[in-house]
Amino acid sequence: MQPVKLSDRLESNQVVVQRSELRTKCDQRAWLNALTAKVTASAETETERLELWAGYLQNAFFHSMTAPVDNRGQAVYSPLWALVNRGVHCGQTARVFVDGMISMGMRARLIQLNGHVAAEGYADGKWHYIDTDVLENAEHVRTQDGTIASVREIEADPTLLSDLISPYVSFIPPFNKPESDWRYESVFVPMMDPSAKLQTPFAYKKTATNKQEKGVYFGWNYYVACTLDDPECYN
């Protein structure tokens, strides 16, 4: 992947994708299987696979001026389209992370925060909080022992967020938001989501069948909201 240039960001404004562009004869699940296998070929543990996949997406994507949508106004969730075009928003890159984890036979789930969407991946016996939108260059929220923290661990100790260096990199010009205007900690402030009727943070679980995944939204029009403590709340 080539580095993102300022021109890439500027050209990403008001991206509207025709639904015909999202219809493909490519088996996107098989394509993801091949891609994740290549990206994580050197991994020896589940955690290494998770980190290699997350790091790949952090470098592959950039935060676009607006979230790409189709001509019906629905956000684009095709992993193939997203990785070819690169400029996406948080919920779109988080879905690609989750879909890639599913392709590797690993658990994952979308995480709804306060005005932000990230993900969690399950590896080596614990959940790991993954942000492939704002965080960059293989940066993650880590506990004192160096492991990637879970959402619950971040909630219990918000100071884990204090050493992050990437949150403002994604908002360099043309976004031009200085540190004083936006703090990453704010996404962990609880809020009640009226549509899900749950307080953040909570998770979204994709429920699409293999057939439904062949649609233009790669199955993300089939999902349920669930609490993080629900033992079935994962893909």
Image (spheres, rainbow, N blue to C red):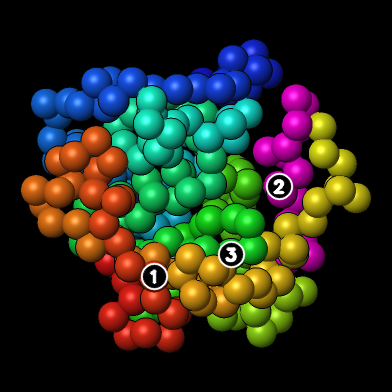
Residue at disc 1, secondary structure: strand
* Disc 1 versus disc 2: nearer the observer: 1
* Residue underneath mark 2: 166
The range drawn in magenta is: 161-175
- Tell me the mark number nearer the camera, choosing from 1 and 3: 1
Give the mark nearest the N terminus, 1 or 3. 3
Query: Pointer 1: what residue?
Result: 225
Front-lying residue, 86 or 1: 86
User: In the structure shown, which secondary structural element does the residue marked by tag 2 occupy?
Assistant: loop
At x 57%, y 77%, the residue is 199
Is 64 drawn above or below residue 35 in the view shown?
Answer: above
- Distance of label 2 from label 3 (alpha carbons): 18 Å
Res. 15 visible in picture: yes
Amino acid at dot 1: Ala
Q: Is residue 106 visible?
A: no
Disc ID at residue 113:
3
Residue 187: numbered disc: none
Residue 187 percent location from the top left of the image: 68, 62
Q: Residue at x 68, y 38 (%)?
A: 170
State yes or no: residue 172 in magenta: yes
- Report, in whole angstroms, how far the alpha carbon at label 1 lies from the one at label 3: 12 Å
Identify the amino acid type marked 2: Ser
- In the rendered structure, which amino acid carries the disc numbered 3? Leu
User: Which of disc 3 and disc 2 is earlier in sequence?
Assistant: 3
Badge 2 density bin: few <14, some 14–19, many ≥20, Cα 10 Å: some
Mark 1 touches mark 2? (CB < 8 Å):
no
